[in-house]
């Protein structure tokens, strides 16, 4: 597939969506990392703005609409195989947003979706770096009016 041994880095968008003290996570149903919880995200489509991709991915995976999106930073994932060839290379635009209302329902690529407090995150299997990125996202909440 395009994602496996890509000819160039793939651009993705990922969103830390907050409601009060809770973060919205989706349990991945597909590999890599099937069964682990992560922030909703996916690849940016050609002709799509990165911010629009972030909103679309949250909507596709959780059925929720986010508002007041803030850009956090880029986060890179580079995975090599046993011969050191680059097997996967993603550059993820990390966003932070509020999702004040609506019922989260698992959609595309999500086995389940749920709201978690930071304390809850110790009790579930997380995709690598999710905890660090969730904690980092909290610093944007004041500017989003949370």
Image (cartoon, rainbow, N blue to C red):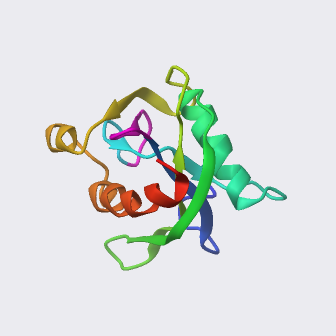
The image shows a total of numbered marks equal to: 0
Q: Residue furthest right?
A: 47
Residues in magenta? 19-32
Residue sitting at the far bottom: 84
Relative to 64, say whether 95 is above or below: below
Q: Residue 69 at what x, y percent from top left? A: 61, 53
Say whether residue 51 is magenta. no
Q: Quadrant of residue 28?
A: top left
- Vertical placement of 42 versus 124: above or below? below
Mark yes or no: residue 45 visible. yes
Question: In the visual, does 1 lie left or right of 48?
Answer: left
Could you tell me residue 82's position as x and y percent?
A: 31, 72
Left/right placement of residue 104 relative to residue 6 reads left
Indicate the quadrant where residue 121 lies: top left
- Taking depth in this image into account, of 63 and 85 the one nearest to the observer is 63
Residue drawn at (45%, 55%) of the image: 141
Q: Residue at x 46, y 75 (%)?
A: 86
Q: Tell which of 73 and 48 is nearer to you.
A: 73
| Residue at x 36% of width, y 70% of height | 81
Can the viewer see residue 92 in this picture? no
Left or right, 50 with respect to 69, comes to: right
Looking at the picture, does residue 127 appear above or below residue 5? above
- Residue 118 in which image quadrant: top left
x, y percentage for residue 77? 43, 69
In the image, residue 47 lies at what x, y percent?
84, 58
């Amino acid at each position: 597939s395009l994602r496996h041994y890509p000819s160039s880095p793939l651009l993705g968008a990922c969103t830390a969506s907050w409601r009060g003290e809770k973060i919205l996570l989706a349990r991945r149903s597909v590999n890599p990392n099937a069964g682990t919880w992560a922030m909703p995200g996916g690849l940016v489509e050609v002709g799509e703005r990165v911010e629009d991709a972030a909103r679309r991915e949250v909507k596709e995976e959780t059925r929720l609409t986010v508002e007041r999106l803030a850009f956090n930073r880029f986060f890179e994932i580079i995975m090599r195989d046993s011969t050191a060839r680059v097997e996967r290379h993603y550059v993820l635009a990390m966003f932070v947003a509020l999702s004040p209302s609506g019922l989260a329902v698992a959609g595309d690529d999500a086995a389940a979706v749920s709201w978690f407090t930071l304390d809850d995150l110790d009790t579930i299997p997380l995709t690598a770096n999710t905890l660090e990125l969730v904690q980092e996202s909290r610093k944007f909440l004041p500017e989003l009016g949370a």
